[in-house]
Image (tube, helix red, strand yellow):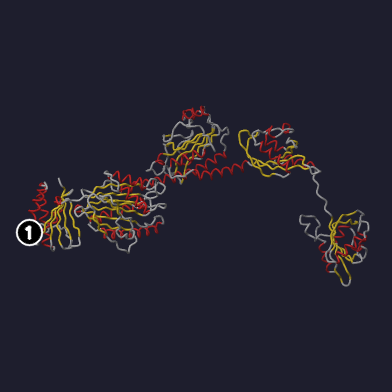
Amino acid sequence: MAAMDSAREASDAPTTAGPRDLLDASTDAAAIVSGDGVVTGWTRGAEALLGHPASEVVGGSAAAMVAMPADPARVAAVAARCRAGMGWNGLISARHLDGRTVEVDLRVSASFRIGEQECFLLSARPQRRPATVDPSVIDGFLTRSPVGMAVLDLELRYVWLNDTLERFGGVPREQRLGHRLSELLPGLQTVTIEGLMRKVLRTGVPITDYEYVGWSWADPHRQRAYSTSFFPLVGADDTVTGVCYMVLDITERWTARRLLALVNEAGTSVGTTLDVMRTAQELADFAVPRFADFVVVDLLEPVLSTEGHGTWLPDAGPAPARPVMRRAGMSSVREGCPEAVARIGDRVDFLPPPHDASLLIDGDPILIPVLDPADELWASREPERARSMREWGLHSLVSVPMRARNTALGLATFVRSLNPVSFQPDDVLLARELVARAALCVDNARRYTREHTAAVTLQRSLLPQALTGGTALEVASSYLPADATDGVGGDWFDVIPLSGARVGLVVGDVVGHGIAAAATMGRLRTAVQTLADMEMPPDELLAHLDDLQLRLSVETADDSARQSTATAVLGATCLYAVYDPITRRCTMARAGHPPPVVVAPDGQVSFPEPPAGPPLGLGGMAFESTEIELPENSLLGLYTNGLIGGADRDMEACMVRLGEVLARPVADLAALCTSAVEELVPVPQPDDIALLLARTHALGADHVVSWEVPADPVAVAEARARATRQVEEWGLGELAMTSELIVSELVTNAIRYADGPIRLRLIRDARLTCEVADASSTAPRLRHARSTDEGGRGLFLVAQLSHRWGARYTGEGKIIWAEQEIP
C-alpha cells in the first residue's frame, strides 16, 4: 500500500511534456498486476492516461485494458523474462474509456511479491509522434539562411540556390540555373572548386571548410574570403545524383588572421639590425607588394642625428607647421621608384594636406580612399606629388605617424596604384600595427646608435691621440673597434715618457662593452699615467691599480643596488712594461693579460712570460716583475685578447701567426701594425682589438755621462764644473748656467741629507736630464722658505729652472732628477 500511495502522489504532478520527460518516470501511468493477470493497483496517472477510474479497474483483468488481439505466447514469454529478473519494455495499444486506442510505451518490471502474491509493476507513457514541420518553413529556412547553399547536377550545373548565395555572387538566380560556376564567376578559384566537387561526386566523401579568396560581381573591387563545404546528394537507390555546397563569407575572420600573420611576419623582417636607416628601409620593403604599391618612410632629422634625443614630446611645446624630415626608406613595385619626388637622404616636409606637424605628435592615421590630384589643397601645397599622382595613377593613400615611447619619429606613407582596390578601414589597422612595430625598432636603433656613438667618442677621446717614444722607441698602434652588434669595449693602450729617457708601455682590456666599460677604461688609463708618473715599478703599479679596480667594483655594486640600473664592473687585464734605452733592459708585469711578443733583430720570435698574475679587481694576490734585455732594433708587441682570442679561434695558433707576421722585414712600423691586425682579424669580431708595437733604440756613451761624487761639500764645485763642461761639449751652451745651478742644488742636498755613495749622471736625449743618486730612501720635499730663512730654497729653485723634476726609488736608494727642454 505504501508503494501504491507513492505512485498515487506522483501521479498528481503535471503531465506536461518537457525535455527531461524521456529520463523522468515520475509522470508515468503505473499499475500493479498479479501473476494471474488481475489488476491490484491503479494510479491517478493510469486513470489520466486511459480514463478508467481505479474503482472500475482494480480486481478486474488487465487484458481488458489492451486493444490488441490476444497473444498468450507473447504474454507467457514476457512473464518468463520478468520472472527471470530482467524486465521488459515495448509498444502496445491500450483501450481508452471513450473507446479510442492509445499507443503507449509499456515497461514491465521484474516480478516481486506482496505477501504471498506474485506481482508485476507496469508503467506506461503515451508514444510521442515525430514533430512535423510545414514545408513552407523548410523552404523559407533554405532560401533565407545566412549560409549560401546550392545544388548542382552531375555536370556541375546549377539546379537550385538560395537567396544568400545569389547575393554573395552578384549573379541573378535566372542566370545561374543551368550554368557552371566557371562560366559565371571567373574571379573565384573556379578550377579548384569544381575539381573538389568532382572529387565529392567520385568518392562520395564530403569536403568541409575549404577556404579561398577571390572577387565576385557583388563586390568587384574588394577581395573577399569564403569557407565552403561540399557533400554528395544521394537518391533512394543510394546512387549519387548531384552535389550540394554551402558557403559562408569569412572575410572579417580572414582579414583578422591575415593581419595577425602579416604583423608576425613583420616582426621577423623589420628591425633585424640596430640601424635606423636600415630599419626604415626594411619596413618599406616588407610592405611592397604585400600591402601597398609604393611606400616611403620619412624620419625627423633629430632621429637620424647621433646627437639628437628624438623629436618633440607632447609637453615640449608647439611643433613647427612643416617638420624637417629626411627620406629614410622607400620601395615601389616599379623599378627605381619613379613615383617618388625625393630620394633616400633628401630633406622632405611631406604631410598629407591639410595636416600640419601636430599630426606626428598626437594625430591618428590618415586614410584617403580616393586621391584626387585636382584637389585644390594638393595642387597648391604638393604640386609635384599631384603631378606624380596623375602620371603614375596613385589613387589611394594611408599615412601613419611613427611614434614610440611617447616620442615622435616620423611618418610612413602607403600608396596604391597598380592594385585597383582602394584602402579600407581594415587596412588602416594593419598599417598601424606594421608602423608601430617598425617605430619601436627605429627607436631602439636610435637609442642604441646614440649610446654606441657616445661610447665610441668617449673611448676615442680617452685613447692617446698621438704616441711618442722619444729617442728610445719608435712606436705605432692600431685600434679596431668591436663589431657594431656588440658595442664598444674597454681596450686601451698608452706610451708614457718617464724620467731618465725611459718609456712606459701599457695595454689593457676592461671586461664588458658600452659606455660603462669605456668609462672604466678611462679611469684605469688615468690611474696608470698617475702611478707611472710617480715612478712606480711595474709590479707595484699593478698592485695599486688592482686596489683601485676593486674599489671601483664595490662602488659600482653599491650604486647598482641603490639604482637597480648600473652594471657592476667585472674586472680588467693589464700589462705594463718599462724600457730603459741606456741599459737596453725592459721590466714588465702583467695582470691576467696575454704575454708580449718580442722579435729580435735577427727575426727570432719569442713570447716572454712574466708571471700572469690575477686580473685587476680580484685582490688578495701579489704581482711579480720580469726583466729582459732587448737588443737595439728589437720589436716589442703588446696586444689585447681580441687579436688572438675568440670562441672559434685557437689562441696558441694565433700567437704563432702573430709572431710570423711581425717577423717580416717591414721598415714602416705603422704599416706593419695595420697589416698584422688585418691579417689576423679579417672579419669583424665581438671584441675590441688593440696592438701596440715598439722598436727599441739604445742611447750610446756619447749621450750619457756619469761621475761618482764624494760625500764632501767641497766636491760640489767639481761636480758643477764637470757638468758645465759636458753640457757645453754637447753644444748646449744655452743650458750651461741653469744646469750648473741644478747640479749644485741636487748634489748639495744629497751630500747634506742623504747617504753615500752619491752619483751624478747627465743624459742628452729629447731633453737634458740631470740625475743625482744616493743610498737614502728619504723623499725630497719642496718647501716655500720665508724671506728671513737662510736655506730651504734649493728644490724650489730646481723646480723653477727645470721643465719637470721628481724622484724615483731603486733597490739601492733613490734618484732625484730634473729635465730641461733643449732649445
381 versus 671 height, above or below: above
Tag 1: amino acid: Ala
Q: Is residue 254 visible?
A: yes
Image height of 456 relative to 69, above or below: above
- Closer to the camera in the image, 69 or 427: 69
Query: From the viewer's perspective, is 74 left or right of 699?
Result: right
Q: Nearer the viewer, residue 318 or 599?
A: 599
Q: Is residue 738 left or right of residue 75?
A: left
Q: x, y percentage for residue 64? A: 93, 60
Q: Foreground: 183 or 448?
A: 183
Relative to 353, say whether 511 is above or below.
Answer: below
| Residue 524 shows up from this direction | no
Which residue shows up at 16% across the image and 63% down it?
Answer: 776
| Place of residue 222 in the rendered image (x, y in percent of width and height, measured from the top left) | 61, 35
Residue receiving disc 1: 715
Relative height, residue 248 to residue 536 (above, below)? above
459 on left or right of 176: left
Relative to 116, 466 lies left or right:
left
Identify the image quadrant of residue 549: bottom left
Occupied quadrant, residue 254: top right
Closer to the camera in the image, 752 or 622: 622
